[in-house]
Amino acid sequence: MDWEKYSRQILFRGIGKAGQERLLQSRVLIIGCGALGAAQAEMLARAGVGFLRLVDRDFVEESNLQRQIMFEERDAAERLPKAIACARRVARINADVRAEAVVADVNYKNIEQLIADVDVVLDGTDNFETRYLINDACVKHGKPWIYGAAVGSYGLTMTIRPGVTPCLRCVFEKIPPPASSPTCDTAGILLPVILTVASIQVTEALKLLTGCIEKLHGGLIQVDVWEASFHRVSLQKGRASAKCPACQHRRFEFLEASVRQSALTLCGRNAVHISSLGDVSLDLREIAERLKLLGEVTLKEFLLVFRVNGYELNLFPDGHCIVKGTEDMALARSLYARYIGI
Amino acid sequence: MSVTVRIPQPLRRFTENRDMIELSARTVGELLEQLGRQYPGITERLCEPDGQLRRFVNIYVDGEDIRFLSGLATELEDGMEVSIIPAIAGGNEHAPSL
């Protein structure tokens, strides 16, 4: 092992040689490789965390580059899936780290398998439905996970240790309905707040992985980089909510049938995401041949782009698809049925 | 009782962009009423039509969640700090503006 690579981190008292050895043996899952997730992956790769599983369903676009630090213009030109682009960059940053890219939608079917063999789960998602699913799976299996979110110049983060701290549903009992919270599509986003939230999340992950449990911040942290404010409220004191369905009653509504993710969701402006219908592995080349007769087809390394009548279908090998040019779910479904037909 | 209320960025468009507001109230419920009178529109973001706190919004008095104190009846003392923390999703999740 080339310890020189990590010498400055080993000099830091909180880590030391023993901590670095533990990091190299550690396994982390990053769910969502957008702004937060990419920043987390970059920091964990440089820190020498031995294994990173990077999951994302989306591809890189030009409007991502302002804040998603792992990606470059050529990734956007290639429409590279974010998970793949992230894993390739991790490989270039640090050969000690094994990065596994998973180009898929995280859902109730795959979440338990994704978290099964990792030590910590980091939240890089952009929606509460997925976060409550992560919370259910992590509480069920006693896996620590770190919530983080940012919008505008404002960010929030907390570290959840099932059985020790309150869980996400203890703190936020219900999913905010659409229209009740701002998003980056409506309020914009500054890169510095992403990096601040990701930095706190990664520091917490390093403490968990090296066993420095007593140094965890134990609260809900609010930051606002524009106002230069940093504020923490304590969540210690065994304050799990007695009503919490997840950590108190062990009812995992998001993992079970009671609150099921819909197959279709709006994603960003003027786009609908269609989940994969099952365990499929598509031959994109073959589909491209067929669609060429009907519209404009571009075949990328991991993606088929099909343009027809002002709509754009972005089809991934596992069958999930992002339909651009509409927010009408029924229309997106019918375009998918008509042209992809699976 | 004079207390300071911290307004998170997503709600500042209701408060003329102010991040700290001084108000005088005996309880958290009274504080929210006053806040709503002074800054129209903010109450609907924080409370259900029946006046209860929305379940994705938390209020902390000197760092303590009011759900573990006396809820909206939690009494305030001079110099206390009240923080409002709504859940935020971030990213590209589709939703019209707040």
Image (cartoon, coloured by chain):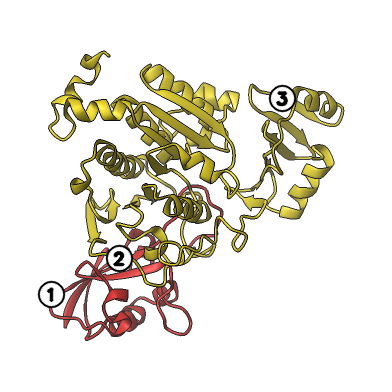
Chain colours: A yellow, B red
Q: Label 2, secondary structure: give it.
A: loop
Q: Give the residue at mark 1.
A: B79
Mark positioned earlier in the residue sequence (2 or 1): 2
Residue drawn 20% across and 28% down? A18
Q: Position of residue A17 (x, y in %)?
A: 18, 25
Residue A21 in the figure: left or right of residue A89 = left
Residue drawn 64% across and 48% down? A270
Q: Position of residue B78 (x, y in %)?
A: 13, 79
Which label is found at residue A307? none
Q: In which quarter of the image is the N terminus of chain A?
A: top left
Q: Where is residue A183 in the image (x, y as percent from the top left)?
A: 47, 53
Residue A78 in the figure: left or right of residue A65 = right
Q: Label 1, secondary structure: give it.
A: loop
**Badge 1: few (under 14), some or many (20 or more) residues near its Cα, within 10 Å?**
few
On screen, A111 above or below A179?
Answer: above
Instruction: Please state which amino acid type lies under the numbered disc 3.
Output: Thr
Contact? badges 3 and 2 (CB < 8 Å): no
Instruction: Please state which amino acid type lies under the numbered disc 2.
Output: Ile
Q: Label 3, secondary structure: give it.
A: strand
Q: Give the residue at mark 3.
A: A298
Could you tell me how far apart the alpha carbons at marks 3 and 1 are, in whole angstroms? 63 Å
On screen, A94 above or below B44?
Answer: above
